[in-house]
Amino acid sequence: MSKETLGETEYLSACLSQGLRDLSLSGETARKLVQLAGDLVCENEKYNLTAITSFEEIALLHFADSLSLSAFLPAGASLLDVGSGAGFPSLPLAAARPDLKITALDSTGKKTEWIAAEAGRLGLSNVTAVCGRAEEVLAPGNPLRESFDFVTARAVARLGVLCELCSAGVRQGGSFIAMKGSSAAGETAVMTKAKLATLSLSEPKTESFDLVRPETGERYGRTLLIFGKTGPLPPKYPRSFAKIKKSPLF
């Protein structure tokens, strides 16, 4: 059940065949993801984009993890990916879901340059890369503020920090989806309904699942926390990142 046994496309399909990630890849999507994995490994030799560098780990821990969002995104939705890093979940989602309108936001120029260049190489016209800090890009008066159907963040910061930053990007009636691993239970334990209401967010719906390594059956727990946006965010939020980190609301 290794990549050598199955081949790259079949290994990708095996990674995506569990639980919430039960996606069938078209031949074109699979080709783009295989190319993305190869390009990522090559680029990582010049610039440290990710600590995950083998095809097997990229397929499971980057691609399958990223594509777990797909089931929760309706056709034609707009998505802001805060702290996109090397383009996850933005690039795999853009390849698998050409109907989505994706904006990848990161504060490191080399990473947003990589995302934009790789989107061009893969022919992904539905993803745009923006370099900037979320608290500045989503500040009052910025056209991106509260303009997206969905905002997501993956392995960026603790939940109390993310809720304040990401609520600023979600339109009323939209959702913030936090992508978490084993830390989810501890981070949600300190949330309160009142603090979430301060950020115009509802209590989250929780979707838990496992990423499963095809060759060993090893499982990696994942949780999606889906917060609804209940109204406009007060203009004093988000605060500066230093203030959020020093005194998170929860």
Image (cartoon, grey):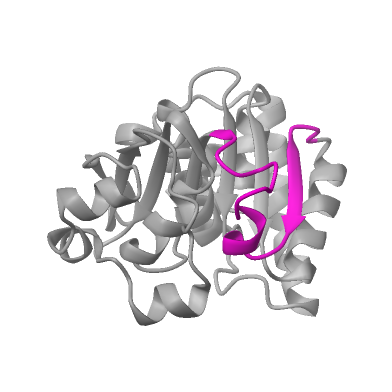
Query: On the rendered image, what quadrant is the C terminus found in?
Result: bottom left
Of 94 and 10, nearer the camera is 94
Q: Position of residue 131 (x, y in %)?
A: 74, 61
Direction from residue 189 to residue 78 in the image, left or right:
right
Q: Against 158, is 198 above or below?
A: above
- Residue at 66 percent of width and 56 percent of height: 137
Q: Is residue 130 magenta?
A: yes
Direction from residue 155 to residue 52 in the image, left or right:
right
Q: Against 29, is 183 above or below?
A: below
Residue farthest along the front direction in this orientation: 235
Residue 50 placement: quadrant: bottom right
Direction from residue 221 to residue 232 in the image, left or right:
right
Q: Is residue 35 magenta?
A: no
Of 188 and 98, nearer the camera is 188
Q: Which residues are magenta?
A: 124-148
- Residue at 44 percent of width and 77 percent of height: 243
Q: Is residue 28 visible?
A: yes
Q: State the count of labels.
A: 0
- Residue at 67 percent of width and 43 percent of height: 103
Q: Position of residue 60 (x, y in %)?
A: 46, 52
Of 97 and 76, nearer the camera is 76
Q: Is residue 213 visible?
A: no
Q: Main secondary structure of the magenta part?
A: loop
Residue 183 placement: quadrant: bottom left
Q: Position of residue 154 (x, y in %)?
A: 46, 57
- Residue at 34 percent of width and 42 percent of height: 200
Q: Position of residue 96 (x, y in %)?
A: 61, 31
